[in-house]
Image: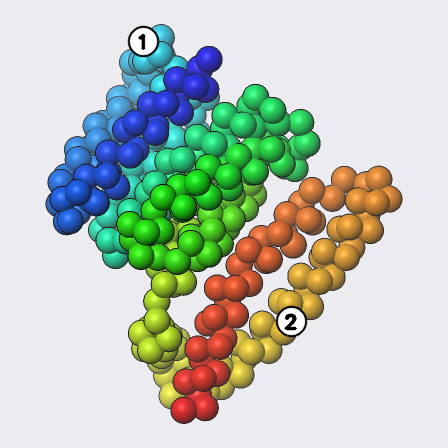
Amino acid sequence: MVIWKRKAYRVVMGSLFPLAYLLAGTPTFSLGLGCFFLTLLLALEWERRRSPAVYRFLLRHAGGIFKTEPGRLTGETYYMMAVVCSLLLLPKPVCICHLFFLVFGDAGSAVVGTRWGRHRLLPGKTVEGAAGHFAANLCAAAALSPVTDIPFHTLAYVAFFGAVIETVSTKVDDNLTVGTVPGFLLWWCVTGEVEGAAILSRFLSLLFPGSEYAAISVLAIIAGGLSSLWLLLLIVGLVAHLGGRAVGKLLSLALVWAACAPAFLKVVHILVVASVR
């Protein structure tokens, strides 16, 4: 029952930010609201460290909204940091989709994983939870695509990527990883070839002054190497799995590369096209 309360709270409160942005047309109200809640949460973090009794009181009276065993920061604080960062940096349609994905994907993975999770992938992560994350965001993508004019297949890919990132986030709070990385991936996916080439050109000129073409060659070699590594990881993982050995981490690495590959190959494609021109 606690998980339902926490996720219902997250869905209701979390939907306020992208919904207000969508209706108002500007991020001003959403950003102000996010900064207000982030300030409150940071004050709570300070107070619970200074006086643990405050946090114990909150746990008794918050109706299961907060986790009983937070890390260095609570998941709610990480979540609000991701919201504020997204509102500040991401374009409007990208930000709206990303924030809705963050809300519904988290709820889908937690509820489905807790209720029906049977096949364990990594500590605290199950196949059913990852499927719940992806399915929830796929439904959100179907509703958001006509509103934001972002193609459904692009949103579906980012939804899949988010499910993978959430699954492998065992050492870092997934509110932070899923709250930032998929949003910037979506931004990159909707970026046009000309604009993408300009961004990458500026980035490479900073890293390799006067050696952009050499950098393109190096990236192409890295792409080929990573593709070979992915196939090797996948084959070794599957063989080991059929042999009855635990290979969750190995298959997770292969899955992460499969999720990252389209975005990475887009980088290489734009660089190669730019060098030919």
Disc number placed over residue 61 in the picture, else none: 1
Q: Residue at x 58, y 53 (%)?
A: 256
Report the residue that reaches farthest toward the front: 146
Q: What secondary structure is marked by label 2?
A: helix
Picture residue at 37% right of the left edge, 23% below the top: 8
CA neighbours of label 1 inside 10 A, class few (<14), some (14 to 19), many (20+): few
Which quadrant would the C terminus be assigned to in this image?
Answer: bottom left
Q: Is residue 241 left or right of residue 260?
A: right
Question: Picture quarter containing residue 17?
Answer: top left
Q: Nearer the viewer, residue 185 or 250?
A: 185
Amino acid type, residue under disc 2 in the picture: Gly
In the image, residue 51 lies at what x, y percent?
30, 16
> In the figure, is residue 18 to the left or right of 75?
left
Look at 40% across and 46% down and name the residue there: 141
Three-letter code for the amino acid on which mark 1 is drawn: His
Judge whether residue 66 can be spotted in this image: no
Q: Which mark is residue 225?
A: 2
Image coords of residue 59 (percent x, y): 36, 13
Residue 198 image offset from top left, x and y in percent: 32, 77
Pointer 2 local density, CA inside 10 Å: few below 14, some 14–19, many at least 20: few
State the count of labels: 2
